[in-house]
Amino acid sequence: MIPVRGNHEDCSRAWRGWFFLLDPEPIELANDIWPDQCPTADLAGQNWNYTAPYPVKFDNLQVIEMDTSRIDHDTRRYPDGAMVAQYTGEFTHIEKIAQDAGTLSSWLVTHRPFWAVASWGTDSAGPTDLTLQAALKASKEGALPAQVKATMAGHIHLAQQVNFPDARPKQFVFGNGGTKRDPALGTASGLSAQTITALRRIGADKDSFFWSYDFSYGIITAGASTWDVAFKDKAGADLHQTTFSR
């Protein structure tokens, strides 16, 4: 199990449970006293609003975990300037982690998807996440390196897969495992106009986009030269299948 910190574990919510039970880094406390407030710097200089990206390595894969729990003014209508600088540094670190692994492929997992469609109702759907997009563009490489074969996220309470005509990896959102909190992005007859506009803003189109409003989950299995992805409904039947390069 590789836990991924989300906005429910940020410093205004369940940060204690995150750092007690799930964060892999050692906790540097003053006089072994647990703080009443989420510290902006512990004895090691770590700001607990953010945890640094780190890789989990396997024989033929590494999973890079990125903490995107905190983004202020999370309306996705404009980048948050104060957050862009923070995440620019994190993306530069992620690029180095991926490149330092040589030919070892990487998955980049995070809570907030970089390129997806957020749903506040079909009349107000919008692209995600402008702050993270701006930060990646400002990073050392300005893009995810070729070793990153897929990006995976949650946050949006819908299942999604977005393909891109450029060099970006597929964006997966495995986000509908427990609730239908977010409204649908369209109807059985097609996507809403706002959803199509949001896709264009992230450089995709409706023909390269899968989404599901049903309760669902995803399974990724290793093929000979690909990773095989299946989105399944609550009865285990396939909703959608795709592959990406190993």
Image (cartoon, rainbow, N blue to C red):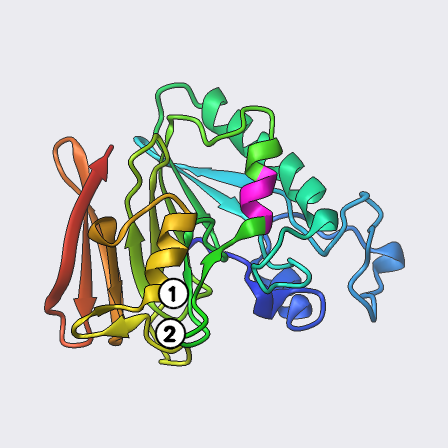
Label 2: element kind: loop
In this view, 80 is above or below 123 = above
Q: CA distance from mark 1 to mark 2?
A: 7 Å
The label number, if any, that marks residue 194 in the structure image: 1
Residue at image coords 80%, 66%: 34
Tell me the number on the disc at residue 153. Answer: none
In this view, the residue in front, 183 or 232, is 183
Q: Position of residue 7 (x, y in %)?
A: 58, 65
The residue stretch that appears in magenta: 131-135
At a point 37% along the width and 35% down the height, the residue shown is: 168
The answer to the question of whether label 1 and label 2 lie on touching residues, with beta carbons closer than 8 A, is yes
Q: Is residue 102 left or right of residue 15?
A: left
Left or right of 108? Residue 10 is right
The residue sitting at 37% across, 74% down in the picture is 122
Residue type at mark 2: give it. Thr
On the image, the x and y values in percent for residue 235 come to 14, 76
Q: Amino acid at mark 1?
A: Gln
Q: Toward which corner of the image does residue 179 lie, by quadrant? A: bottom left
Q: Position of residue 149 (x, y in %)?
A: 33, 35
From the viewer's perspective, is residue 168 above or below residue 159?
above
Which image quarter: residue 48? bottom right
The total number of labels drawn is 2
Of residues 96 and 32, the one drawn nearer to the viewer in this rendering: 96
Q: Earlier in the sequence, mark 1 or mark 2?
A: 2
Q: What residue is at 32 percent from the left and 46 percent from the top?
A: 204
- Relative to the observer, which residue lies in front, 6 or 145? 145
**Helix, strand or loop status at disc 1:** helix
Residue labelled with disc 2 = 122
Measuring from the top left, give residue 70's x and y in whole percent.
Answer: 65, 59
Q: Is residue 152 above or below residue 222?
A: below
